[in-house]
Image: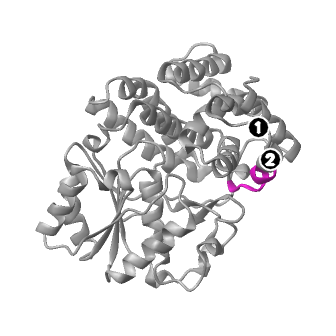
Amino acid sequence: MTTANRNFNFPTAIRYGAGRVKDLAQLCKDNGIKRPLFVTDPGLAAMPMVKAILADLKKAGLGVALFSDVRPNPVEANIHEGVRAYNGGNHDGVIAFGGGSALDIGKMVALMHSQKISVFDLEDIDDWWTRADPRVISPIIAVPTTAGTGSEVGRAGVVTHPDTHEKKIIFHPLLMPKAAVLDPELTVGLPPKLTAATGMDALAHCIEAYCAPGYHPLAVGVALEGMRLVKENLPTAVKKGKDLQARGNMLVASSMGATAFQRGLGAIHALSHPFGGLYDAHHGLLNGIIMPYVLVANRKKIEKDIERAAAYLGIKGGFNGFLKWVLALRKEIGIPHKLADIGIDVKRLGEVAAMAIKDPSAGGNPIAFTEKQYKSLAKKCVTGDL
């Protein structure tokens, strides 16, 4: 508890439920968007689902166009191409549709299309966000098709720097979408492996936000309930992909994780960002693999908090019971035990550690690890030394 002054924010308006994607046209109109740029990834762009949504938007009188040049780990070039499409089509807003990569690029396009600076001038450092001209940032409607990043309720996006391969967190308050549509029907086609990986991303957000040292009791409560939703629904969503209740609860858990992590993230993300940037590996999968190693490394600072979480989740055995649950969950849904299992080696641990200690997420870890400690922890994640 603290008596110091603090500012609290909670997220955007949410439309939840099966079939709510039909609300998109009205949401655009409600937010003054007449010519939306529909940003998604190439895989989704080719699907009948997206073609049907675009047809509905055109039928409603909206001047919508499609942009889908988005990589799984977005790079600056994706933003530049999106900005060209945005300005070339004289658009006035963005519909960001897809997984975390498509949502982030959509948000970046809405942010950058008329700025005079580089996107990296808006990295989440101090008050760098004030460098942007807020008058030219366009409204965003976000529609997630995975339950993981929670970018649909966030004020930031992640993009890989082309020279350093560092994942940079770009922040601006107006990156917060005006509305988010959480429609579980849109996630039904997500394969089991991606359902598992994105679900572990949501869990990582909840756990790290819950354990972060910052004062934000509202975020703590949201993170805790988000963990419960993951515990009770992720295995079902992986094994029974058409279960709309499990899919819907995972979408909500994902949004809750991203809502909560304004309190802070930690070493799970501080490590997954450099590993992802250097090895082009899936962010959620990395978080799922790295998670137990960081829990153990942080134990002396988080043990009592994790004991409380375990009690709420109905897990016996305090910290040890919680750790066993995480390990059992990973095994049940097919998350590998170590990074070596997905082709990551120990050759770049020095680079990983140097990038991890500079990552903004490191500031939210309960223990301020040194570069040497990050290197040791990264090695354990690769070799499976829990």
Q: Secondary structure at mark 2?
A: helix
Mark 1 neighbour class, 10 Å CA radius: few under 14, some 14 to 19, many 20 or more: many
The colour scheme is one colour
Q: Position of residue 296 (x, y in %)?
A: 73, 27
Q: Position of residue 154 (x, y in %)?
A: 48, 57
Above or below, 34 against 344 in this view is below
Question: Does 356 lie within the magenta span?
Answer: yes
Report the side of 298 relative to 259 (left or right): right
Above or below, 59 against 72 in this view is below
The circle on residue 353 is 2
The circle on residue 378 is 1
Q: Position of residue 74 (x, y in %)?
A: 53, 59
* Three-letter code, disc 1: Ala
Q: Are marks 2 and 1 in contact (CB under 8 Å)?
A: yes
* Three-letter code, disc 2: Ala
- Residue at 43 percent of width and 57 percent of height: 102
Q: Secondary structure at mark 1?
A: helix
Quarter of the figure with the N terminus: top right
- Residue at 81 percent of width and 46 percent of height: 368
Q: Is residue 217 visible?
A: yes
Main SS category, magenta section: helix
| Region in magenta | 353-360
- Residue at 61 percent of width and 33 percent of height: 342
Quarter of the figure with the C terminus: top right
Question: Does 153 lie within the magenta span?
Answer: no
Rounded to the nearest angstrom, the CA distance separating label 2 from label 1 is 7 Å
